[in-house]
């Protein structure tokens, strides 16, 4: 079964954007962008909310930007053909290799898992990820933790009254003092007690 992953840059205090909506602290350097280039190769389809979709629209035509370096052009070449599903109640059309979702995130993930296809089902955006998490559909949380406290904003982790046990499966420090953490959700049979 295709796994569902949630990957975003996050501040040390747990936010993907600050209280002013900014995320200038989370811009990737070349080393981190090379990491994302490798990570995206394992993705078969990317689910996005409207805000993240609009932020990422730049990459649909980025190959025309003469100021980009080879690593950025590689990201654009990987991102542009990647199938994307956009969840929005306000958009009537989307661009590139994207389509608007017809149902909720749980229905879409179930549909994608039932179809032939390879690669992970990646989720971007906190609101969409919160819906998937509430339905117990996220298999891995992947965070690039930036050494900054932004004091508020949109949280990376959904705020709901449900415990989720995680297993740390990978860490990687970068020279920019950013740390990558990859956690797998520990699945237990119903009624099984967590190990302590």
Image (cartoon, rainbow, N blue to C red):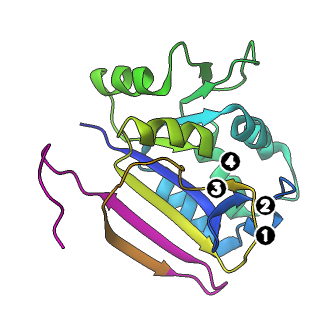
Camera-side mark, 2 or 4: 2
Q: Nearer the viewer, residue 141 or 81?
A: 141
The residue positioned 58% from the left and 46% from the top of the image is 78
Camera-side mark, 1 or 4: 1
* Residue 196, above or below 100: below
In the rendering, at what x and y percent does residue 130 appear? 52, 42
The residue positioned 23% from the left and 36% from the top of the image is 1
Camera-side mark, 1 or 3: 3
The quadrant the C terminus occupies is bottom left
User: Which mark is first along the chain, 3 or 4?
Assistant: 4
- CA gap between label 2 and label 4 equals 26 Å
Q: Nearer the viewer, residue 106 or 36?
A: 106
Residues at marks 2 and 3 touching, judged by CB atoms closer than 8 Å: no
List the residue tagged with mark 2: 18
- CA gap between label 2 and label 1 equals 9 Å
List the residue tagged with mark 4: 76
Does dot 1 land on a helix, a strand or a loop?
helix
User: Which mark is first along the chain, 4 or 2?
Assistant: 2
> Which residues are the magenta region?
173-196
Residues at marks 4 and 3 touching, judged by CB atoms closer than 8 Å: no
In the rendering, at what x and y percent does residue 81 appear? 58, 34
User: Which mark is first along the chain, 3 or 1?
Assistant: 1
> Dot 3: few (<14), some (14–19), or many (≥20) neighbours within 10 Å?
some
What mark, if any, has residue 155 been given in the picture?
A: 3
List the residue tagged with mark 1: 25
In the rendering, at what x and y percent does residue 85 appear? 56, 27
- CA gap between label 2 and label 3 equals 9 Å
Q: Is residue 188 highlighted in magenta?
A: yes
């Amino acid at each position: 079964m295709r796994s569902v992953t949630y990957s975003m840059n996050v501040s040390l205090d747990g936010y993907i954007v600050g209280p002013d909506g900014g995320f200038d602290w989370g811009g990737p350097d070349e080393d981190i962008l090379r990491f994302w280039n490798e990570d995206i190769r394992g993705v078969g389809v990317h689910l996005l909310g409207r805000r993240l979709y609009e932020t990422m629209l730049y990459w649909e035509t980025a190959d025309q930007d003469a100021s980009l370096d080879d690593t950025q052009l590689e990201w654009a070449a990987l991102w542009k053909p990647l199938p994307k599903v956009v969840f929005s109640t306000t958009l009537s059309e989307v661009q590139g290799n994207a389509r608007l979702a017809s149902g909720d995130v749980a229905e879409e993930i179930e549909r994608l898992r039932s179809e032939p296809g390879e690669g992970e089902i990646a989720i971007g955006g906190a609101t969409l990820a919160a819906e998937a998490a509430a339905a117990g559909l996220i298999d891995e949380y992947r965070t690039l933790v930036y050494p900054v406290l932004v004091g508020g904003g949109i949280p990376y982790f959904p705020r709901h009254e449900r415990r989720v046990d995680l297993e740390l499966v990978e860490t990687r420090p970068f020279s920019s003092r950013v740390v990558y953490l990859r956690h797998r959700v520990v699945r237990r049979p119903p009624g099984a007690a967590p190990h302590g």
